[in-house]
Structure formats: structure tokens, C-alpha cells
């Protein structure tokens, strides 16, 4: 099983970090292919808790080589501070590899992210404020700065000046913001060059050779399917492609090389930031999910919006990613409810709809159609096999599997590595 993609099937925070870390011990490379430090991946190893933003979750597995692919946007200051934070905790980060083609998040990209959100006021996206959207905009606009530019001072100078030429006009005239000096940006960026040089390589060549040699490569998505700029709830999305195709463009491997695509799926639903969310709860159940599930953002500390499981979304994730498996997380959080509502379809303008509507207005009007499933009260956090689960928990999982269109191959019953029920091996 040389190449697998692991990605979020909902709006992010499904537990991708834990799932990646779990597989990290058995894979040779873990590769981030999109996004940047907007991600917040929590990994719990024994009594140690790690919050990773930019680094692939495989960094915590000593035998695994972590790779930042060309599709990622890299804030060099964040990268270096994340590395030194891990080094201080005794984690060896020396194997990290970074694509020279990855784009850099510059200080002006962060400024633009913040001022545009402020300008949008009530219509804001609720971004993480990390400069993600503006950096991808520069990339597509062909005014971006790439990691390799750090190693050519004159090119870096030219590119930063070109990028700031227009931006400073917009900042001053539209946003009433002072101009940003190219000189200062270049100086700051050059200050990172020597510290990063040793990590930078041709990751596309490396990963293709690794796959050809039978090595196991895991592509780890940030964010989630419904935050995808093409397939998500646009414009309330991130500016990259967390869906499976993003692994190909964001790492430089062809689709024929990928054998398995695993969707990480929370047993209920959460979302951070603005945008439609049909099963969102505003009552005590929503509050209970937030409290029991610890649903607070790892990156921004914002409370996550919470709601019941939405099978329409799960089916959509199966479709647009070609999912071969699901990893169902946080089943333990649902312990204690007498009955658990599950959204099986939407009602839109009086009509029952089984598939995610392509029209934004329809999705904004979608009302969940719920089916009630019986709950359970037994503690499931010690369950090691599917049959250890109470009958109603088993039935809940089976019902979700039936509705979602791909087998549930693992179940999370707690945040720790060992709090997982493996049903089918991902690596066979
Ligand atoms: P990611 O962004 O997809 O990696 O997810 P986050 O780390 O932002 O959020 C998931 C949270 O759920 C983290 O605090 C994890 O430690 C925790 N978690 C993951 N799997 C489980 C699980 O099966 N049960 C419980 N109770 N917590 C889990
Ligand atoms: P992980 O990898 C949840 C959301 C933001 C906002 C929108 C755009 O931990 O699952 P951006 O800063 O990316 O331009 O913000 O996307 N968002 C996330 N929500 N989990 C994430 O990452 C997210 N990364 C971005 O809240 O609504
Ligand atoms: Mg997260």
C-alpha cells in the first residue's frame, strides 16, 4: 500500500492529526500538500499533547520523514518557532524536508488578510488571520514568493518589490493602511534563509522515487472537504484544495500512484468561522457537544460551532474524494444521549433532497431531515474491538457507514493513540 491520502471529510478539525500520528509509526513519509498554519492538529502521545500547525503530524514518529509539499504555504517565522518548540520537548525534527516550490507567507500577506476581513465587516469569512488567502491569491496571480527565492537575494528583492508595488497602493488608498517597505520584508526573509536551506529539496522527485521503491507515503490534508475552494461552501472556504486531488497537485504525484483515500469523519459536526451549516445547534445539545468534545479551535482559540452528524455531507465527501474508507472519530463524545438525531437528507423549499445541492442559495436554505437513532450510556473509551461497543453504538456506526457510502475502517473513542478501534487495516 505505497500511497494513501488522509483528509477531512467535513469542515476541518475531524481529528486528522490523531489519525495521521496513529499511522505515522508504520509509514515512511507524511506529506502536507496544501494549507498552512491555519491548520491546528492536536496529537496526544501518552501524557504529552502537541498542537501542530504547519508541520506534518508524522514529525512525532521517529522513523517517519515529514515533508512540506509544493502546495503548502509556509510562514517561515511560524515554521522555525514550531520546530524549536518541538526541539525543546526532545522531538528530533532534523528529517524535515520542504519543497523549494512552496510559497512563502510574507508579512504583507498577513496584513492583507487582516485588513480585508476588517473591511468586510458583517460579511467576513472569519479567516484564521494567518495570511493564507492572500498568499494563495499571489500564487495564482503570479506575484508570489517561493521558498527557493530565499536563496537568491536579487530575485527576492525584485519579486517583493513587484508584489508590493500594487499592494501598497491598495493598502494606502482603500484600507487606509501605511505602506510596507520592501527593504524591510526582504531583510526579514533573508534572515530565515540560512536556517531553512538544509531542509529544502526537490520533494516531487523524492516522493515519486519513494513510491516507486515501495515506500509507504501518507498525504495529510489540512482543513476539510467542505472548506475546499472548489468543492466547499464557497466563499466560506479556505483558499486551497484539501480534497484528494489536491494531494496530486500539492505534492507532484500522479493520481495513478494513490491507492487509498481515507476520510476523517467526526461522529457529529463542527465548523469554525462563518458560512452555512445545516445541522448547527443553538441549544443545550450544541453546548454539550462543545463542552464534552472540547470543541475550541487549536489555532485561534475560537469556540467551534457544533451540530449533529450530517450524512449528506459525508456522502458528498465520499463522492468528491473517491473515499475508500472512513475513520470515524469522537464516538465517545456522544455517550449519554438517549437518542441521537442524524441528518439523512435536507428539505429545500418543501422538497426532500438526498445529495448536497450545487446551488449556494439552496444550501443556505437547507433544513435537516433527522432520523433518531437510539443512544448508549456505557463508557466506551476502553473499547478495543467493535464488539466491545454497546449494541446501540455499533448500530450508530453501522447506520453512518450505510448512509455515508464507504466502509468505516477505524473508530476513535478518545484522543490518545491507543484509544482507537481498528476494523480494517489501512496499510494492508
Ligand atoms: P484536526 O485539525 O483534524 O487534526 O483536529 P483537531 O486536533 O483540531 O481537533 C480534534 C480534537 O479531537 C483534538 O483535540 C483531538 O485530540 C481530539 N480527538 C481526536 N480523536 C478523538 C476521539 O476519538 N475522541 C475524543 N474524545 N477526542 C478525539
Ligand atoms: P484544520 O486543519 C477548521 C476555516 C477558518 C475560516 C476559513 C478560511 O485544523 O482542520 P483561512 O484562514 O484558511 O483563510 O480561513 O477556513 N479554517 C479552518 N476551520 N479547521 C481548520 O484546519 C481550518 N483552517 C481554516 O475558520 O472559516
Ligand atoms: Mg484542527
Image: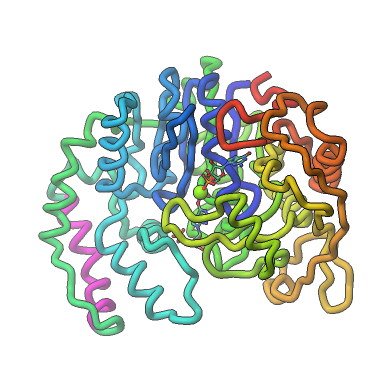
Can you say which quadrant of the picture contains the C terminus?
Answer: top right
Q: Is residue 292 left or right of residue 121?
A: right
Taking the magenta stretch, the answer to whether it contains residue 198 is no
Residue at x-position 38% and y-position 80% = 119
Give whichever of 371, 4 is nearer the camera: 371
Spot occupied by residue 93 in the image (x, y as percentages of width and height): 32, 28
Residue 101 found in image quarter: top left
What's the magenta region? 155-172
Residue at x-position 48% and y-position 36% = 43
Residue at x-position 41% and y-position 41% = 52
Can you say which quadrant of the picture contains the N terminus?
Answer: top right
What secondary structure predominates along the stretch shown in magenta?
helix
Give whichever of 352, 48 is nearer the camera: 48
Give whichever of 218, 299 is nearer the camera: 299
Q: Is residue 307 above or below residue 202?
A: below
Q: Is residue 343 above or below residue 46?
A: below
Residue at x-position 18% and y-position 76% = 178
Q: Is residue 143 visible?
A: yes
Q: Residue furthest top?
A: 213
Give whichever of 252, 288 is nearer the camera: 288
Spot occupied by residue 283 in the image (x, y as percentages of width and height): 69, 69
Spot occupied by residue 259 in the image (x, y as percentages of width and height): 65, 29
Q: Is residue 45 above or below residue 107?
A: above
Spot occupied by residue 376 in the image (x, y as percentages of width and height): 81, 44
Amino acid at each position: 500500500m505505497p500511497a494513501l491520502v488522509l483528509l477531512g471529510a467535513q469542515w476541518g478539525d475531524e481529528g486528522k492529526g490523531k489519525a495521521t500520528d496513529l499511522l505515522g509509526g508504520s509509514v515512511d513519509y507524511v506529506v502536507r500538500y496544501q494549507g498552512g498554519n491555519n491548520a491546528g492538529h492536536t496529537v496526544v502521545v501518552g501524557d504529552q499533547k502537541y498542537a501542530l500547525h504547519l508541520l506534518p503530524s508524522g514529525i512525532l514518529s521517529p522513523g517517519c520523514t515529514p515533508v512540506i509539499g509544493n502546495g503548502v504555504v509556509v510562514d517561515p517565522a511560524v515554521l522555525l518557532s514550531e520546530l524549536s518548540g518541538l526541539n525543546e520537548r526532545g522531538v528530533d525534527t532534523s528529517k524535515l524536508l520542504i519543497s523549494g516550490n512552496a510559497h512563502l507567507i510574507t508579512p504583507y500577506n498577513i496584513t492583507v488578510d487582516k485588513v480585508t476581513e476588517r473591511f468586510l465587516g458583517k460579511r467576513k469569512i472569519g479567516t484564521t488571520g494567518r495570511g493564507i488567502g492572500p498568499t494563495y491569491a499571489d500564487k495564482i496571480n503570479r506575484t508570489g514568493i517561493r521558498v527557493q527565492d530565499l536563496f537568491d537575494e536579487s530575485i527576492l528583492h525584485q519579486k517583493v518589490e513587484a508584489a508590493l508595488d500594487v499592494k501598497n497602493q491598495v493598502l494606502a488608498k482603500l484600507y487606509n493602511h501605511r505602506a510596507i517597505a520592501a527593504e524591510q520584508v526582504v531583510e526579514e526573509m533573508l534572515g530565515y534563509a540560512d536556517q531553512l536551506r538544509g531542509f529544502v529539496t526537490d520533494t516531487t522527485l523524492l516522493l515519486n522515487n519513494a513510491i516507486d521503491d515501495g515506500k509507504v507515503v501518507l498525504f495529510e490534508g489540512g482543513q476539510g472537504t467542505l472548506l475546499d475552494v472548489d468543492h466547499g461552501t464557497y466563499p466560506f472556504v479556505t483558499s486551497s484544495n484539501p480534497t484528494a486531488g489536491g494531494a496530486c497537485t500539492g505534492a507532484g504525484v500522479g493520481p495513478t500512484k494513490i491507492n487509498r483515500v481515507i476520510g476523517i469523519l467526526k461522529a457529529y459536526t463542527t465548523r469554525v468561522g462563518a458560512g452555512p451549516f445545516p445541522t448547527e445547534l443553538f441549544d443545550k445539545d450544541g453546548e454539550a457537544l462543545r463542552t464534552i468534545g472540547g470543541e475550541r479551535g487549536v489555532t485561534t482559540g475560537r469556540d467551534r460551532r457544533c451540530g449533529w452528524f450530517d450524512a449528506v455531507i459525508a456522502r458528498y465527501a465520499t463522492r468528491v474524494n473517491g473515499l475508500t474508507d472512513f475513520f470515524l472519530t469522537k464516538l465517545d463524545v456522544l455517550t449519554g444521549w438517549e437518542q441521537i438525531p442524524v441528518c439523512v437528507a435536507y428539505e429545500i423549499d418543501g422538497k426532500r433532497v438526498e445529495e448536497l445541492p450545487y446551488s449556494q442559495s439552496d444550501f443556505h436554505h437547507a433544513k435537516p431531515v433527522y432520523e433518531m437513532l437510539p443512544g448508549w450510556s456505557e463508557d466506551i473509551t476502553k473499547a478495543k474491538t467493535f464488539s466491545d461497543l454497546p449494541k446501540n453504538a455499533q448500530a450508530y456506526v453501522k447506520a453512518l457507514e450505510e448512509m455515508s457510502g464507504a466502509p468505516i475502517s477505524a473508530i476513535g473513542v478518545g484522543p490518545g493513540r491507543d484509544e482507537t478501534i481498528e476494523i480494517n487495516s489501512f496499510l494492508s
